[in-house]
Amino acid sequence: MVELDKCDIHCIHDKAVQAVRQALFSEDVAVSLAELFKALGDPTRVKILFSLMTRELCVCDLTAVIGVSESAVSHQLKILRTLRLVKFRREGKILYYSLADDHIEKLFAQGLEHVTE
Amino acid sequence: MVELDKCDIHCIHDKAVQAVRQALFSEDVAVSLAELFKALGDPTRVKILFSLMTRELCVCDLTAVIGVSESAVSHQLKILRTLRLVKFRREGKILYYSLADDHIEKLFAQGLEHVTE
DNA sequence: TGAGTATCTGTTCATATGTACAGATATAAA
DNA sequence: TTTATATCTGTACATATGAACAGATACTCA
C-alpha cells in the first residue's frame, strides 16, 4: 500500500504528495474550519456553549455560571455569534442566548469521546 | 419553559443558574475539550490532519503538501502527538505519520457541515 | 424626557502562539 | 567510526488572544 521509493529531493514521495494536494481542500476552507475549531478552543467559550446546551440564558446568567466578567462573556459571545454558533432573542433589556444549531452538540459529543477515552 | 422572573441581583435567574452549574462538566473536562479543539484550530494543523486522512505521510511529504518549513511541521506534529491525534511508525530514517483514530474524521465532517452550509 | 439596568465596545496589557533559523539527535550505510 | 539524511528541539520574534476596566448603547418605565 505504501510506496517505499526513496525520496528524490530530500524524501518526498512525489506521487503521494501530488495526490494529497489534489484532495486537499482549499485554503479558504482550511481557514474557515480552523476558525470554527479555534472558537471552540477556549475554556470560557466551551463553558458558554455547554451551558447553552441545557437552556437559553442571558448574559449575566452566563457570567454567574462561568465566573468571569460580563465584559468577557460579551466579548466571547460576539465571537460565537460571528461564527454562527449562538443566536439570541431580545426580551426587553434582556438578551437570551441559545445555540444556533445542533452541530455544536455533535462536535462536543465527538470531542468528549476523544478526551475521555 | 423559560422563567421570565426579573433578576434578583442584576439579572440573574437563580434557579436556572444553579441547574446549569450542576450540569456543567468539571473545569478539567472543559480545559481538555478546549485543548482538543484548539489543536484543531490552526490552518496548518487542519491541513496536516486532512492530508493524513488520505494516507500516511512522512514529515517532508507534509512539508511539500502544506508549504511551510519542516521545522514548523515537526513542531505542529508534536502538538498533535501530545493530544493523541496522530501516531507514527518508523521505517529507517523516515517517520510515517497517520491519524491516531477516527474521531478526527468525524469532527472534521461535522465541522465542514457547519462551515459549508 | 430622565433614570436605571442589561449588554456592548474600545482600549490596554500580560500571556500565548506560530514560524523560521540554527543546531542537536537518530538511523543507515560505507 | 565517519558521513549523510530525516526529523526534532531550543530560541527569538512578530503577532494573536483573552481578560478587565471604563465608557457607550439600547431598552424600559416613570
Image (tube, coloured by chain):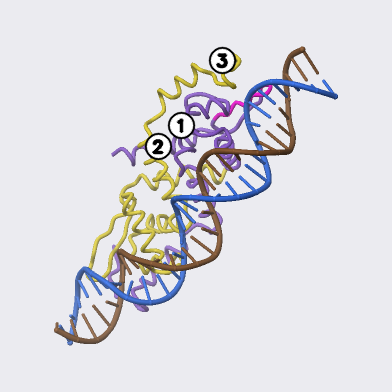
Chain colours: A yellow, B purple, C brown, D blue
**Placement of A18 over or under D8, stated as above or below:** above
Q: How many marks?
A: 3
Q: Amino acid at mark 2?
A: Ala
Q: Is there a contact, CB below 8 Å, between mark 1 and mark 2?
A: yes
Q: Residues within 10 Å of mark 2 (few under 14, many from 20)?
A: many
Residue B64, position as x, y percentages in the image? 50, 26
Where is mark 2, residue-wise?
A30
Q: Residues within 10 Å of mark 3 (few under 14, many from 20)?
A: few
Where is mark 1, residue-wise?
B50
Q: Amino acid at mark 1?
A: Phe
Q: Amino acid at mark 3?
A: Glu
Residue B114, position as x, y percentages in the image? 34, 41
Where is mark 3, residue-wise?
A3
Q: Which residues are magenta?
A: B91-98
Residue A46, position as x, y percentages in the image? 45, 54
Residue B3 sits in quarter: bottom left
Q: Secondary structure at mark 1?
A: helix
- Determine the chain carrying the residue at label 1: B
